[in-house]
Amino acid sequence: MAETRRPEVDVAIVGFGWCGAIMAKEMREAGLRVVALERGAMRDTWPDGAYPKTLDELTYNVRHRLFQDLSQSTVTIRHNEGQQAVPYRRFGAFLPGQGVGGAGLHWSGCHWRVLPEELRLRSHYEERYGRGFIPDEMTIQDFGVTYAELEPHFDFAEKVFGTSGTAYRVKGQVVGEGNPFEADRSSPFPLPAQKNTYSAELFRRAALEVGFHPFSIPSANTSAPYTNPYDCQMGPCNFCGFCSGYACYMYSKASPNVNILPALRDDPEFELRPGCEVLRVDLDSTGRQATGVTYADAEGNTVTQPARLVIVATFAYNNARLLLLSRIGQPYDPRSGEGTVGRNFNYQNMATIKAFFDTDKYVDPFIGAGGNGVAFDDFNGDHFDHGPLGFVGGSPCWVNQAGNKPASGIALPAGSPGWGAAWKKAARDAYRHTVSMDAHGTNLSYRDCYLSLDPTYRDAWGQPLLRMTFDWHDNDIRMSRYVTAQMEKVARAMAPKSINVLVKQPGAHFDARSYQTTHMGGGAVMGTDPRTSVLNRYLQSWDVHNVFVPGSSAFPQGLGYNPTGTVAALTYWSARAIRGEYLRNPGPLVPR
Amino acid sequence: MSNGSLPSDRRGLMKLGAALLPALAGLEAGHAGIGRAEAGTPPAAAPAAYAPGYFTATEWRFLHAFCDRLIPADETGPGAVEAGVPEFIDRQLATPWGFGKLWYMEGPFVDGPPELGVQSPLTPRDLYRQGIAAVEASVRRAQGRAFAELDAAARDAVLHALDKGETDLGPALPSAYFFASVLQDTLHGYFADPVHGGNRGMGGWKMVGFPGARGDFWDWVDRHDGRPYPLPPMSITGRRA
Ligand SMILES: Cc1cc2nc3c(=O)[nH]c(=O)nc-3n(C[C@H](O)[C@H](O)[C@H](O)COP(=O)(O)OP(=O)(O)OC[C@H]3O[C@@H](n4cnc5c(N)ncnc54)[C@H](O)[C@@H]3O)c2cc1C
Ligand code: SF4
């Protein structure tokens, strides 16, 4: 096991998921020499999504072939400071990715633009509801960037991803049957919306009947053949149903591997090194400038990779960990409220309703696509009056039938047994006749929810694991219960035989055992004040100007929607700032 | 912090067992219900064709008798034994999963709140070896016979007690955790593609009407008439049921 030093490059990118891939392409367009270091293996449609082997639920969805290797590294979790954190030993609530493409290779594909008011959440609530409306313990804040500034980057990202959807308003003109709550767009979606599954169609009709405003979920699963601005080609999605957790064998689900890597692969000035676990960003003696990164390669060698610019793109909470390990920025202290790295860790807040129909009505849940479905946004963002309700936040509601297969579990009506002959009958009578719908809500940020390094547990390289201190708060549970009750009206309007409402009870604790989502955020948030943010509005470290940190780690609080559309737009926004101002004049883009 | 400690009291054991239950994904609807104890036929003998790689002959008999009650054979569909679930489990135990290599297994193993997940140091191989021995010992103490020799109703009673966390399997293995693990593996074996050794003849898929590795529903997605997708299941090998 040797220590080696590689020749300097212009840019070292840590992690090759969506953020790493977008940055790599952008930095190459700027003419810079780029090395991307990815801890996981090389992955691509072939062999990792090859037909028919990919249609294997046990391997991919039960044993999680494409996800992070927890035996090497994981996180620890506790609900509060009084507890001893314990390791997240097996997958449950969230499923981080690993390998070339990151979770972007095997995500689902719901592709959203953040709501304008969510980018300035604190200001918006203070303006509309008054300062006293936001609870003291809630540390929500503005992103420091506006929707208008991000719009061109949302637009471009949709073109790169080949997103299917129906626009509502383009350049101020109402053009279609899309989401009437959606912000203005500069152009329509590159592809028309996908077809609806039967379950989504039932939901659409019922939502209309109740008086809500259903629309097709913008989906990064293609409705038709497509070629993106990088000349990468996609085929139409056939609703194979082996989507979330699987690489797409049809080249239909946007991924860094399908939509960006082909444009980089043969570029001699770009090098992708899989199997490289970055241990830290190296700083010079002043601690104000990064000199590159140090990583462990697959053979166990410790390698120094000097670079003029370092992009930390390791996914959500991992970004905070790498900053903490590298001593970039001041760690957050929940008692004093000082320090920023690890502050405002946030997540998603899901509730689900299962509607069970008679056995002569076939919903066939195995037909589906990860990004596909029908949603209504009447209770997302600030589309409804929060004044009398007394909580902050909201949830989009949807049927998003990604393909439910039996080995991952068959939902049964309440009171059904879990085994034996009666279970068999219940499973047979439920499986093809169940519509599942979600209220996919905000989790806001709180003083006592944060990330830090664990004092006890270590990864395979001897470095401390990241520790999450996290629990649900009353505001978020009340929000979820309110919106779920609205969605229940839609479920009932579908006239099912029975329904099951799975929503957090008051006082519920975070449960790491059952899937929530993999939409965590915060820990390295962006903003306008270095006392409450790790990054400036261009995702540049306030402390070390040649370190940029793209990812949902920049979100000061959780969104109602899935994060990746906003993550991608922010990454393009940051990349353009680097390509423009930063390269001309390397230094802080915003004075401290 | 109790360094490297295992849960040592009864409450700890219960918590650890309960901790696995929600991991049975999709059983949100309440796993706690009572299965009907039916006077089933004794479990079919293990097919001669498959020789277990991990289980001893005694364990193998136990596993058949156990799975047979989790998913009994009846007119609804094949039982776990017919479906090859024991073979599936035996084969899975030879994979990295069986050795606990898909999990973070560094100590110390400290019992946390159940919501924070299983903290057991046992690999699946350990779990089956220790669990089967402990259940056998407990059944022998109480009834003077091997588990596989009990009739269906008596075996169901043993399963219910395990499920409820009422059987003492020693300090390292809460009975509810053992039960939930075997049930989970059984369901996986019943519904996974037959290439993994279970779901023989795609019987599990036929029971619920899952078409398996079809992988293309373009023509079916927007029929919207509530009628069933018509094609029978297919394995990733291309074999049809
Ligand atoms: C099952 C699933 C479904 C999802 N569905 C949706 C959806 O429908 N819509 C949506 O918006 N979002 C969805 N997401 C979330 C989406 O996948 C992420 O938001 C997105 O991938 C984030 O991109 P990223 O580049 O920040 O991180 P990733 O894509 O996770 O990439 C980060 C990469 O960094 C690597 N890395 C980490 N640490 C190191 C290190 N120290 N050294 C080197 N490399 C390192 C990792 O191995 C990984 O490959 C889903 C996620 C999952 C798991
Ligand atoms: S459902 Fe569509 S996008 Fe998803 S994996 Fe199948 S073909 Fe690809």
Image (cartoon, coloured by chain):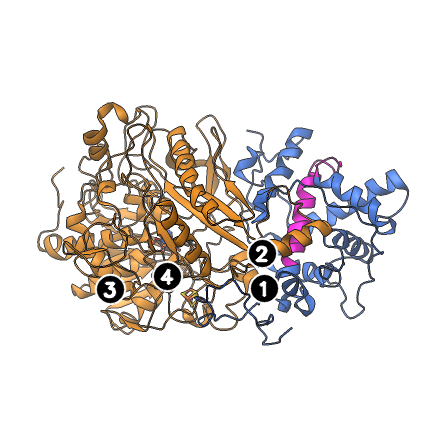
Do the CB atoms of the residues marked 2 and 3 lie less than 8 Å apart? no
Is disc 1's CB within 8 Å of ligand 2? no
Q: Do the residues at discs 4 and 2 belong to one chain?
A: yes
Is disc 3's CB within 8 Å of ligand 1? no
Between circles 4 and 1, the one closer to the viewer is 1
Q: Which residues are magenta?
A: B164-189
The residue closer to the viewer here, B16 or B68, is: B68
Gap between marks 2 and 1, in whole Å?
Answer: 8 Å
Any mark on residue B210, and which? 1
Gap between marks 4 and 3, in whole Å?
Answer: 18 Å
Gap between marks 4 and 1, in whole Å?
Answer: 30 Å
Where disc 2 sits, the SS reads: helix
Quadrant into which the C terminus of chain A falls: top left
Precedes in sequence: disc 4 or disc 3: 4
Q: Give the labeled residue for mark 3.
A: A159
Q: Is residue B43 visible?
A: yes
Do the CB atoms of the residues marked 2 and 1 lie less than 8 Å apart? yes
Task: Please give left or right for residue B38 compared with residue A364 in the image.
Answer: right
Name the residue: 26% across, 67% down.
A270
Which amino acid, mark 2? Answer: Tyr
* Quadrant of the rendered image containing residue A371: bottom left
Q: Chain B, which colour?
A: blue
Any mark on residue A564, and which? none
Callout 2: residue from which chain? A
Q: Chain A, which colour?
A: orange
A226 in relation to A554, above or below: below
Precedes in sequence: disc 2 or disc 3: 3
Quadrant into which the N terminus of chain A falls: bottom left
Callout 3: residue from which chain? A
Residue A160 at x, y percent in the picture: 26, 64
Between circles 4 and 2, the one closer to the viewer is 2
